[in-house]
Amino acid sequence: MEKTVSEAIAYRRSTRVYKDEPIDNEKVKQCLRNASLAPTSSNLQLWEFYHVRSKDTLENLAKACFNQNAAKTAQQLVVVVTRKDLWKQRAQANIDFLNTVFDKPDLEPRLVKRKKQAEDYYKKLIPTIYSDFFGILGFIKYWIFQVVGLFRPIYRQTRLSDMRIVAHKSAGLAAQNFMISMAGIGYDTCPMEGSDTLRVKQILDLPRGAEINMIIGCGIRDVKGIYGPRFRVPFEEVYFEK
């Protein structure tokens, strides 16, 4: 029986040693479909998920992860990749979707207006935010927006580094969707940042514009796989009402 969301969150632990027991490929793939439903900035979905099952690739990736147990004993690995470089294609995909959904001769005026606003967003605003040239345009936009921000609220994250952060935040949300989905069916995961990301890109034959967000070990927890009781800073120290 699948767990409730709260049960899955409570069950999920970063598992660093897995049993030598196979897990169902299709179930993992379904959890990745759930990952793709995560919220994402401007619905650009600047992510890719690499579901690694090949023994040779698993061994190579484990080495690139410094042979840490969470990689070395994993039955499968999932590599979450950001693709900020695909923003034009993903913006166009949103425009194509809008044209399909709103392709009706008798469209209500409010829907015509909504379509126009969405098209302007993807045709004008997104290029303004994401266009750059070796970081120079982003720097110029940043200072222009800072000046405008003296007089009214304005979006300020316009530099190349800012947009990378946006892409990685969205990818992190997708990764969490995946890990909670895995926990919901009794599978375990461990998100890893410790890796030689250049070697990981070479192993997966990723293009230059791709960036590694995290590598997630997947399997069924061994009794030795949970290194200790869960520790969290007291909730009262991180919760504030205003």
Image (spheres, rainbow, N blue to C red):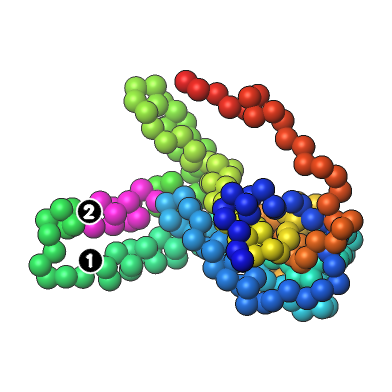
- The amino acid at mark 2 is Arg
Q: Main secondary structure of the magenta part?
A: helix
Residue 102 shows which numbered tag? 1
Q: State which quadrant residue 24 falls in.
A: bottom right
Taking the spot 46% from the left edge, 50% from the top edge, the residue there is 41
Residue 114 shows which numbered tag? 2
Q: State which quadrant residue 212 falls in.
A: bottom right
Whether the residues at callouts 2 and 1 have beta carbons within 8 Å, the answer is: yes
Q: Position of residue 75 (x, y in %)?
A: 79, 71
Q: Is residue 55 above or below residue 172?
A: below
Q: Is residue 63 magenta?
A: no
Q: Position of residue 175 (x, y in %)?
A: 62, 56
**Element class at badge 2:** helix
State left or right for residue 43 relative to residue 36. left
- The amino acid at mark 1 is Phe
Q: What residue range appears in magenta?
A: 115-126
Residue 153 shows which numbered tag? none
Q: Is residue 121 above or below residue 136?
A: below
**Element class at badge 1:** loop
Q: Between residues 20 and 46, which one lies in front from this camera angle?
A: 20
* Cα–Cα span, label 2 and label 1: 10 Å
Query: Can the viewer see residue 222?
Result: yes
State left or right for residue 171 relative to residue 141. right
Decide which of tag 2 and tag 1 comes sooner along the chain: 1
Q: Between residues 142 and 234, which one lies in front from this camera angle?
A: 234
Q: Between residues 241 and 32, which one lies in front from this camera angle?
A: 241
Query: Can the viewer see residue 62?
Result: no
Q: Position of residue 199 (x, y in %)?
A: 79, 63
